[in-house]
Image: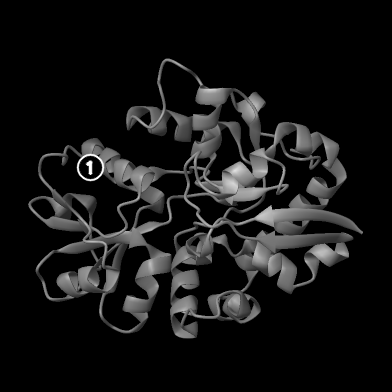
Amino acid sequence: MQTLIFNQGDASESRIYYCAHYLAESLGLFAAENLQVTFTTSASGGHTVQGGQVPAVLSREADLTLGGPMVVMKHFQQHGAELQCFCASVAANPWFLAAAQAQPDFKLSDLRGKRVLDVGNVGTATLTFRWLLAQQGLQDQVELIAGSGDQVQDFATVAAGDADYALHAMHMLAPAIAAGQLVSVSSLASLCGNVPWSAYIARADVLIEKAAAFAAFSRAIQQALAWIATHDAEAVAAQVQHFYPHYPFDALITGLAAYQQAHVFAVNCEISQADFNHFSQLLSDIGWLDPSQPVPYLALVTQAGVER
């Protein structure tokens, strides 16, 4: 039996759009590949180079983690090609806009003159939303308000009409939507285009040392992603529910369905060069990356033994 240690960061990192590896475990796909994956956590997480799961991988306490390729790109600009992405998980922006009332004909231009409460205050997500506004010439036409740090209060503010929209990942919005407090208005996925928002990450040398185990992992994730694409949200929720013990089941179904409808889950585990380059250009445009230092796809992305 081959083994891999998977550090997920802290509890806040276990989001419902990160369910592919949980599904692979639940369906026995890892076991079928003669692979044992041990899930561990860190005292702190976060999609930055300093996040708790990244040092665990760098120090070899863990074999892999899951996060944004933006972390690998940033790490490359600071330290070189020590980390690589090797398997896709989330292939589009998982952030949504929600409001108190349904807006079936919503367009991004409808934000003109409105107040958007950025509940999550997550760096790259906020910068990406500002990039979207700039693409529409709305950067000076929308009031983007930083969240208070109290998610419940922020959602109540939008529900009461004291702000027009809530901006957050569906993982956080789904409980309020399932409870009837808010209504999903728009996914940002299609607006940003295909971007490898999240992928599995490992040290380049460990990927070589444990090539067979990582290839087995990628094959299991490939099957899990195919299962998500061919089953409804309720079926997926039933398989992964025990990995989210404190998350309401109706919200789990609501959130997974929203992500499926928005095509947020990767179709397969390949990270294409076109999508990687589009994402790196976006990240350079918003100031996350230094545009004077190109981030090379071939140095930072591998398919871990799975044919392209």
Dividing the image into 4 quarters, which one contains the C terminus? Answer: top right
Residue, far right: 1
Q: In this rendering, would 138 be left or right of 291?
A: left
Dividing the image into 4 quarters, which one contains the N terminus? Answer: bottom right
Q: Is residue 102 visible?
A: no
Classify residue 175 by image quadrant: bottom left
Q: Is residue 51 visible?
A: yes
- Residue 69 vs 158, above or below: the answer is above
Task: From the viewer's side, name the closer residue of 275 and 199.
Answer: 199
Task: From the viewer's side, name the closer residue of 286 and 60.
Answer: 60
SS type, badge 1: helix
Task: From the viewer's side, name the closer residue of 156 and 48.
Answer: 48
- Residue 260 vs 116, above or below: the answer is below
> Residue tagged by mark 1?
133
Q: Position of residue 211 (x, y in %)?
A: 83, 41
Here the colouring is one colour
Q: In this rendering, would 74 be left or right of 22?
A: left
Q: Position of residue 226 (x, y in %)?
A: 68, 61
Classify residue 81 by image quadrant: top right
- Residue at image location 47% in from the left, 63% down from the top: 12
How crowded is the residue under tag 1: few (<14 C-alpha within 10 Å), some, or many (20+)? Answer: some
Tag 1: residue type? Leu
Q: Position of residue 5 (x, y in %)?
A: 74, 54
Q: In this rendering, would 69 be left or right of 192?
A: right
